[in-house]
Image (spheres, rainbow, N blue to C red):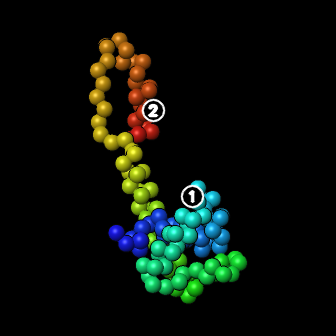
Amino acid sequence: MSKLDDLSAWRLFCSLCNTRNFSDTAGEFDVEVSTVSRALTSLENALGQTLILRVTRPLQLTESGQIAYEHASNILLQHEEMVKELTQSSAGMAGKIRLSLARGSVAVYIPMLMEFNSQYP
């Protein structure tokens, strides 16, 4: 699989665009600076273009880097929203609950069941 399809590499790239510092990006993701550098180099090699000028402090985006950042940040945001939506919908309770209760205990459980039903209709 091409590095261009690697969302983790693009996350590191976008973070690097925001922090403009390899060490800060590495700290944000709890990885080594070399990991950030390798991810950027892999993206640049796959694209055949320089995305970030490493000789300036703080780091500067090239024109291609700016275009890549704008698109990648939107894609990553959409990806996060999709994952959030899917995990929230699967985390919710659904379906019927059936209970068997002894005759004398029904009155004790009715208030709890009504509260549960109001929270999870």
Q: Nearer the viewer, residue 22 or 104?
A: 22
Going from N to C along the chain, the mark reached first, 2 or 1, is 1
Relative horizontal placement of residue 100, taking residue 57 as reference (left or right) = left
Residue type, label 1: Val
Location of residue 109 with respect to 77 vertically, above or below: above
Identify the residue shown where x is 45% and y is 39%: 119
Residue type, label 2: Glu
Identify the residue shown where x is 42% and y is 33%: 116
Location of residue 17 with respect to 25 vertically, above or below: below
Q: Single out the residue that lies furthest toward the top.
A: 104
Location of residue 61 with respect to 29 vertically, above or below: below
User: In this figure, what is the number of numbered marks?
Assistant: 2
Q: Which image quarter is the N terminus in?
A: bottom left
Residue 77, visible in the rendered structure: no
Identify the residue shown where x is 40% and y is 35%: 117
- Where is residue 60 drawn, in percent x and y? 64, 81
Quadrant in the rendering for residue 121: top left
Identify the residue shown where x is 36% and y is 18%: 106
Q: SS for tag 1?
A: loop
Between marks 2 and 1, how big is the CA–CA gap? 46 Å
Q: Single out the residue that lies furthest toward the bottom.
A: 63
Quadrant in the rendering for residue 86: bottom left
- Where is residue 66 drawn, in percent x and y? 55, 82
Residue 51, visible in the rendered structure: yes
- Where is residue 65 drawn, in percent x and y? 54, 82
Category of crowding for the residue at label 1, using alpha-carbon neighbours closer than 10 angstroms: few (below 14), some (14–19), many (at least 20): few
Quadrant in the rendering for residue 53: bottom right
Q: Which mark is residue 31?
A: 1
Relative horizontal placement of residue 1, taking residue 37 as reference (left or right) = left
Q: Which residue is mark 2?
A: 115
